[in-house]
Structure formats: structure tokens, C-alpha cells
Image (spheres, rainbow, N blue to C red):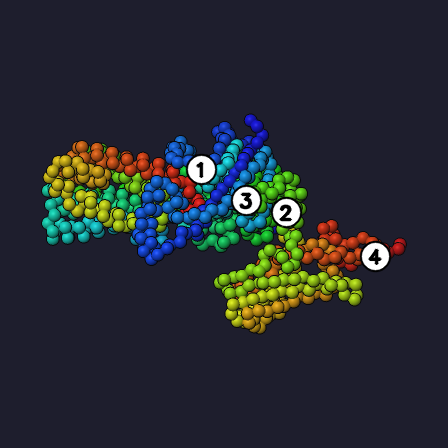
Amino acid sequence: MAEKVHSRPVAVPERDPIPVVHIAPSRGWVSLRLRELWQYRELFYFLTWRDVKVRYKQTVLGAAWAIIQPFFTMVVFSLFFGQLAKVPSDGIPYPIFSYAALVPWTFFANGLSQSSNSLVGSANLIKKVYFPRLVVPLSSVISGVVDFALAFVVLLGMMLFFGIAPTANVIWLPLLLLLAFVTALGVGLWLSAMNVQFRDVRYMVPFLTQFWMFATPIAYPSSLIENETLRLLYGLNPMAGVVEGFRWALLNTDTAPGPMVLVSAAAALALLVSGAFYFRRMEKTFADVV
Amino acid sequence: MSDVAVRVEGLGKQYRIGGKRERYRTLRDTLADAFTAPFRRAGRLLRGQAYGAAGLEETIWALKDVSFEVKHGEVVGIIGRNGAGKSTLLKVLSRITEPTEGYADVYGRVGSLLEVGTGFHPELTGRENIYLNGAILGMTRAEIDRKFDEIVDFAEIERFMDTPVKHYSSGMGLRLGFAVAAHLEPEILVVDEVLAVGDAAFQKKCLGKMGEVAGEGRTVLLVSHNMAAIQALCHQSIWIEGGRVNQNGGTQKVIESYLDSAYAWTTNTSGILPIFSQTHGIGITGCSVHLDPSNDGYTTLRIEIEIETTRILKRIGLGITLTTTEGTLVSMVDPYVTEDIIDRVDHRCRCTFICDEIDRYLAGGDYVLSIWVEKPRVEYLIRAEKVTKITIPARDLFGTGRHFQLQRNGFVPLPMRLAIEAE
């Protein structure tokens, strides 16, 4: 077999100055090294791209699953909570009331469960290559944005159907989505790092999302809670703020995210920061234990 | 800038292997512990003590007091037996895992190649996987764009670029994986045993590529069991034994002492025997090699092998291979070819391979014996690698007082004479 001779570029393209890496044991809590995370943004991009690309490969319905999930949950909710139990819905048709909440919720719940399993799922990568491990749960939450966009289009269609025009408050939607993202990532960081040690997490996550769903005003409005202070405390569940915010911005319910969404944001941020530090602390053991 | 590329100082890596447990005194203690342990573990987990949580107490040092220096542009071989700590060292240097003590300073970007095709996704096409794998190995997108054609060329899979990798043969997958990795351009390349994959032609190509990389003045750390490859590529070598640096210096010398130590076992204390396979219920329990002079001046080789089984096994084949100390295959006695099948083994069996006039067929020198048992054409049951060294005496083939030597003259002492025709 003839071997081909490869021409190599004569001049190596200009690169950053040669980095010096000091490899030594770390102790206790360590910095987040966000700069390094930034240096690995291309890997982050490719992992996200892979997740998006692969998500519905070899399925019959493909990306339709992104819509089926929240849509049929909405149908079931409308039947049982809306029709049978006559749960109030802040004066708007129950189907769109619940669907407007299910769209961000599905994004959150999928992001949470995907990121919790992300490290274990990438075990072969973690054992063979170095990169900031934060990239893994981060990209698995981000890749859910595509699903969110698809489900959101259906939401717009339903608003048209029910004749509901969005208010000018929709400009706040990206921030509300960010809040859902931060919450999912914060919890995902805690759980994915724990999952490396204990596969108990895998069994815990479905329970957690189920409980969390009922603790979030999706099937019912948070206006059921009349006490102002209690509603404020309800914001400690960041998803409560997200869901009510979505309804307020899109459906013009009078659940304007006042102090409650601030409480939510604070809670989400606390989750994210603590999760990130916990993750970094556990990171050094991932390759040995996973 | 100093010319040091990697400086390792007192490096140690401890692993917890678990197993140790406190003895329970009474049933009550046992039950109480069963209830409290999960909470204790959860508590430790939340405090961030990974291992404490799992209750793994027993530890081993996979690396201990490892110190060495590698200069820029040096190609260094790392050799040692399985489990000596070679791969752990590479993992620490490529920052996959943290050391427990000591430190390493690495001057330059490290590309680590501990596996071929890391992160390949079976559902993605060859083209997509090149980008994904490249990014995982630390290449930028622009870099991959630039080298894309070269990579495809090297892997020889142009026609399958848009086929999902799951439809590739394993050989194609390996070629693609190596092709991407071979086009990494870090200052320091860390390679673990990737040359051991693929068919002979591809291995040769990989070896050529590695030589090319080494020739470009890149720093390379290469782990391999293939002594021929190490000899061909590395000037310096480090021999690691039991997690410590045993010897560090010129490749030729290090390999010689490594091979000497690895094969300096007498027949009965070969170290690897007895060896058992739990799955197949069989073990190779003994082996002795005899070289006896026969009447015609040649030597007879007898290899006596003892097998034990936990149940009655029928129709099994016993095979041996002779290799050079560098690992090149010299001869394989394959039961599939010889059809010397053992009909029935009832817990113990002793067999002897006999070859008369062995020195008529093989040049004088050191050979390494491996033994295996198989169900012919079905599966391997057990293998004992490198059981012992066999030294075949060199012969004065041509009556000149000079001997035909394996090291100098090759495997086969051909009685080739020159017929000189007078004009």
C-alpha cells in the first residue's frame, strides 16, 4: 500500500503565548475558573450542537416530541382540572392558561433531568479528555432551548386561536426564560455532581420534577393564595415566578411579577452559585469515580 | 523561556479501592447502622467529601514519588507492566485527574490521546464527528476547517463522510479517530497505547505519523507495550514499576533492563502462573520448559503444561506462541491448524509440546512463551502471556566457529551456501 505524503503548512499560524499549567492537588473550595470556561466555548458549542442534533434521531415523530409533551399534558390538565375540578384560571380559558405555564415548565424539567444525568452520560469523555466539566451540564440545559422554541410557536398559535394578544410586557420573556434556565442549571449542577457518586440521583429526579410541578402554579393560579406574605414566600420556588411571569407577559393576567419574581431570582441565583461551587469542588473526583 | 516542557516533582496519586468495613458486633448494631449509614453518607456528600461518602477506606498509591523532566522536542517512551501506573501518569499530566501530592508543571498546550475516537457519536456522520472529536481534543473550528481534507485523506473514508458512524466497521471508526488525533498540533502530545489498534497496515501508518510528529520538534510522551515502536520513536524512556520511576534514561538501556527484569523468571516461578479464569472454570497452573540435547547434536524442546478445570471440559485446544523479547511473533502453534485437540479434561491434565531439533528451525537467542486454551473456532478460555523466556542455543551452522544468532542474523538459520562458479 502506497503511503501518501502530506504537505504540512510551513508556518504554524500565530497562537497565544505558550501557557504554563501547574498541576497540583487542590484543597477545599476552589474558584470557578470562568475564564477557562470561556476558552472552551467552541467545545461548548459543539456539545450543544450534538445534543440538539442527536436528540430526536431514530424517532418516528422526531422534533414533534417537543410539542407533544407539553401539549398533551395541557389536554389532560384541561380535562381533569379545568373541566372536572373547575380549578380557577385567572379569567382566561383554561387550556391556554395551563399551556402558557407548561411551555417554560417543560423546558425547566427537561433541562433539569438532562443535566442531572449529563456527567454520567459523558463518562467516557470525562475519563479520557480534560475540559472544564461545567461545559457538560451547561450544554445539556441550553440544548433544550430548541424544544422550547418549538413549543412556544404552538403557544403563539393557541393565543391566535383564543384571540389573546400579547402585551408589551413580552419584552420581559427572555429574562423570565433566563430565570428558568438559571434554576434548571443550578439544580442540575448539584444533582449531576452528586449523581457521579451516587446513582440514587437518577431515581430521585423523576420524583423531584413531579413534586416540583405540583408545587408550581401550573394547573392552578397562584392567586389561590390570598395572603400577600405567603405569596412572596411562594416565590422561593423560582419556577412559580417564571410561570406567573409568563402568564402576565403573554396573557395579560394581573399576576405582575412584583416582589415575588425578585424573591424567585434571588433563590435561583443562590441555587446557581452554590451549585457551581459545589460542582467545582467535586470536579476533581469525577474522572476517578464516574 | 527554559527548554523544559514537562517538570514532574514528587508526584503521587492515591486511589481508594474500598473493601474495608468495620465488623458489626450484634444484629442490633447492624440494623442501626443500616439506618444511620445513609444519613452519615449524605452528610459527608454535602460537605463535599467524595470518597468519604462511599465509605471506601482502603487505598493504594497508583503513583508515588514520581519525578522527571522532559525537554522541549523530546520524544519520551513510558514503559512498564500492566498496572504499573503509566496510564495514571498520563491522566494526571493531561489534567483528567488530580494528583494527591506533588506537582507537575507543563509548559505548553497538552493534547492527550488516551483513546482513539473519544466522544464519537454513533448517530452523527463522519463529517460531523470530525468536528465534534476535534473540538473535544482541543482544536478550534478554524483549525479543523483547515485540516479537514487532510484528515479525510488520512482516514481513507472519503466515500463514507456522510454516513452515520454507527454504520462504520470498527476499523473505519479507528482510522477516522486516529486521523483526527494525528492532526492535533499541541506543543505537547500525550499518547497512550493507541498504536495497538487496527490492522498491520494501519499500525504502520500510525507509526509513520507518530515519527513525523516526533520529527517536527513536538514534545511527545508515549506509553506503549510495543518495544519496537518505542525503540523506533523515542530516544529517552522512563520505566515505571509499582507507581515509581524505576529507570530513566536512554531508550536502549532502559528497554534492555526492563526486558531483562520482565523475563528473568525461571520456569517454575514465572510470576504469572497459576492463572485462573472464573468465567470458564479453567486455569493454567504450571509450565516447565526443558531443552535436552539429542543424539544427533541438536536440541529437543519440551514444554510441559498443566491445566486444571473446575468441571469436565470437552474438546479443548491448547496453543502456544513464541515471540521475540520485543514482541514480534515468531511462531504460533495453533490447535486449529494442528488439530491436536484434547478430548476431555477431568479437573487436571498435563500435556507436553515436543519439538525435535528446535535449533535446526530457530536461530539461537531468547524467545518468549505464551500459552492459551481455547474452544477451537469458538472462543478463548484463558491466556497466560509471557510465561517464560526460552533460550535456544545458537549453532555453528557453517562450521566456521561463528554462531547463527537471533539478534544479528534473524529468526531462521537457513543453511544457505554460496555456490561459486569458476569462469
Q: Are marks 2 and 3 on the same chain?
A: yes
Alpha carbons under labels 4 and 2: distance apart: 35 Å
**Marked residue chain, label 1:** B
Chain letter, disc 4 residue: B
Give amino acid for label 4.
Gly
Q: CA distance from mark 4 to mark 3?
A: 49 Å
Quick one: label 4 or label 3, which is nearer the N terminus? Answer: 3
Q: In the picture provided, is B165 more to the left or to the right than A190?
A: right
- Amino acid on which the number 1 mark rests in the picture: Arg
- Disc 3 designates what residue? B243
Q: Quadrant of residue A8?
A: top right
Q: Amino acid at mark 3?
A: Gly
Alpha-carbon distance for marks 3 and 1? 38 Å
Residue visible at 60% across and 61% down in the picture = B371
Q: Nearer the viewer, mark 2 or mark 1?
A: 2
Residues beneath discs 4 and 3 located on the same chain: yes
